[in-house]
Amino acid sequence: MFRVTKAEEQAVRLVMRMAIIACKVTLADLAEAENLPEPTVAKLLGMLRRKGVVEALRGRNGGYVLSREPAA
């Protein structure tokens, strides 16, 4: 048996939410949808970006997208 930390569970929830949405999503939208504080979501998305799970889109119309198709 293995243990999943709270941060790992939250990160998985964020990725699952992004897979369901299947388009660009903002940090604020994810925080609201998962009922998490924005700083927590920002930290988790940063970790996921460094590991290549998500990509950050900069600019006024920026946000986050999954690096690969959800089916992959």
Image: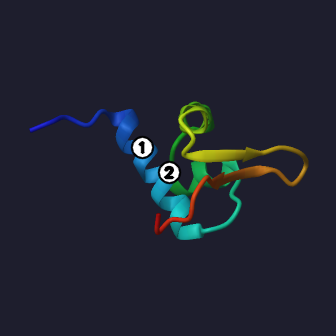
The span from disc 1 to disc 2 (Cα, nearest Å) is 6 Å
Residue in front for this viewpoint, 6 or 67: 67
Residue 51 spot, x, y in % from top left:
53, 35
Relative to 33, does residue 42 appear above or below in the rendering?
above
Q: Quick one: which residue is furthest to the left in this view?
A: 1
**Which residue is denoted by mark 1 in the rendering?**
10
Mark 1 lies on a secondary structure that is helix
- Above or below, 17 relative to 59: below
State the mark number for residue 14.
2
Amino acid type, mark 1: Gln
Given residues 65 and 9, the one toward you in this image is 65
Residue 33 appears left or right of 12: right
Q: Are marks 1 and 2 in contact (CB under 8 Å)?
A: yes
Residue 69 position in % (x across, y down):
56, 65
Determine the residue positioned at 83% across, 43% down: 58
Q: Which x, y percent locates residue 66?
A: 60, 55
Q: How is the image coloured?
A: rainbow
Q: Quadrant of the N terminus?
A: top left
Residue positioned 91% across, 49% down in the render: 60
Q: Is residue 59 left or right of residue 7?
A: right
The crowding category of the residue bearing disc 1, from other C-alpha atoms within 10 Å (few below 14, some 14 to 19, many at least 20), is some
- Identify whether 7 is placed above or below 65: above
Q: Is residue 13 above or below residue 45?
A: below
Does residue 35 appear to the left or right of 66 in the view shown? left
* Secondary structure type for disc 2: helix
Density class for disc 2 (Cα within 10 Å; few <14, some 14-19, many ≥20) is many
Does 67 sit left or right of 6 as displayed? Answer: right
Label 2 is placed on what type of residue? Leu
Q: Residue 30: percent from the left, percent from the top? A: 60, 52
Q: Quadrant of residue 47?
A: top right
Which is nearer the eye, 52 or 16? 52
